[in-house]
């Protein structure tokens, strides 16, 4: 009596499945913890990634990536976005208080502030938005004289050197305690509008597509500041690179100077060069 011919069993334990198909199945299901750790490392390095990018980098199916992303979001390891994910540490928290932001990357912001102050000439009219970076800039204006400062940043007047300014105008509007700024139509009582020599702008994110902030109202007001100024200086430490926050303020073409503390990533550096932005690294 002849013995039955044994059937080939694929590595996945399925009979009659080709080796290639079984390998694909293994790639999608074997050692999910190891694959998810690698996925998290990629997000940590890049800040964010699309499903398409992750499919290519991890060599698995879209369904596998989507399942991984759902599982990892449930564990609080990342934030799902439309078509991809963002590492939780790079996600823009629009409710971060100004006090916490003042403490974050404080040394870098001080260096950036001093470098940006050297771009300012005596007698200029400056318009500054809210944030910790613009406060660091204002505090560094010790060598300047006869400046006119317009701002919605309520933290800024106390830190600005008295000898540096002729006048500080605080714009009106609704007070936002979390950011310590006023939000409202740009303008001063009794005049239709005004101009500024230089807008000095702090941002939440800087990417190849432009500069952005976490709140639409602040982004709109900041865009108006850029519109009334002859030139714009953006202050952004390296933690802001490759972040596209909720509301875009402007494209890179609206900027004349970027003052930062590190070389921008290649994609951003190329976009800055195409836009003609002068990059100053402090």
Image (spheres, rainbow, N blue to C red):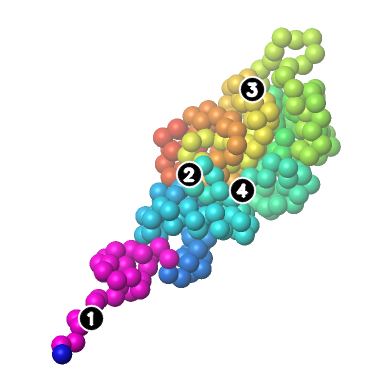
**Along the polypeptide, which appears first: circle 3 or circle 2?**
2
Q: Which residue is mark 3?
A: 224
Does label 1 or label 3 sit earlier along the sequence?
1
Marks 3 and 2 in Cβ contact (< 8 Å): no
Q: Which of 57 and 266 lies nearest the eye of the viewer?
A: 57
Residues drawn in magenta: 2-29
Q: Nearer the viewer, mark 2 or mark 4?
A: 2
CA gap, disc 4 and disc 1? 54 Å
Q: Earlier in the sequence, mark 3 or mark 4?
A: 4
Check residue 6 in the rendering and tell me which mark sits there, or answer none.
Answer: 1
Q: Secondary structure at mark 1?
A: loop
What residue appears at the point 37 percent right and 68 percent down from the top-left corner?
Answer: 26
Task: Name the element at disc 3.
Answer: helix
Q: Which percent across, then down, holds residue 134? A: 70, 38
Position of residue 150 measured from the top left corner of the image (x, y, whole percent): 74, 25
Element on which disc 2 rests: loop
Specify the label residue 91 is tagged with.
Answer: 4
Gap between marks 1 and 2 measured at Cα = 45 Å
């Amino acid at each position: 009596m002849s013995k039955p011919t044994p059937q080939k069993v694929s590595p996945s334990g399925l009979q009659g499945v080709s080796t290639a198909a079984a390998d694909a199945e293994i790639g999608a299901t074997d050692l999910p913890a190891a694959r998810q750790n690698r996925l998290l490392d990629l997000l940590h390095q890049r800040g964010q990634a699309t499903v398409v990018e992750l499919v290519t980098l991890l060599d698995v199916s879209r369904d596998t990536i989507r399942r991984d992303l759902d599982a990892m979001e449930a564990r609080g390891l990342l934030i799902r976005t439309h078509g991809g994910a963002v590492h939780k540490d790079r996600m823009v928290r629009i409710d971060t208080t100004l006090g916490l932001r003042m403490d974050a990357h404080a040394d870098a912001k001080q260096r950036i502030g001093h470098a940006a102050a050297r771009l300012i000439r005596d007698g200029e009219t400056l318009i500054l938005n809210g944030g910790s970076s613009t406060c660091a800039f204002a505090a560094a204006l010790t060598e300047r004289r006869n400046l006119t400062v317009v701002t919605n940043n309520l933290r800024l007047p106390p830190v600005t050197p008295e000898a540096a300014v002729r006048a500080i105008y605080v714009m009106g509007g609704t007070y936002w305690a979390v950011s310590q700024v006023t939000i409202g139509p740009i303008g001063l009582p009794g005049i239709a509008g005004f101009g500024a020599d230089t807008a000095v702008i702090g941002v939440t994110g800087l990417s190849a597509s432009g500069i952005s902030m976490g709140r639409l109202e602040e982004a709109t007001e900041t865009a108006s500041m850029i519109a009334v100024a002859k030139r714009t200086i953006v202050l952004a430490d390296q933690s802001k690179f490759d972040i596209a926050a909720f509301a875009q303020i402007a494209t890179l073409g609206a900027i004349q100077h970027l003052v930062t503390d590190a070389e921008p990533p290649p994609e951003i550096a190329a976009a800055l060069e195409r836009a003609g932005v002068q990059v100053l690294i402090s």
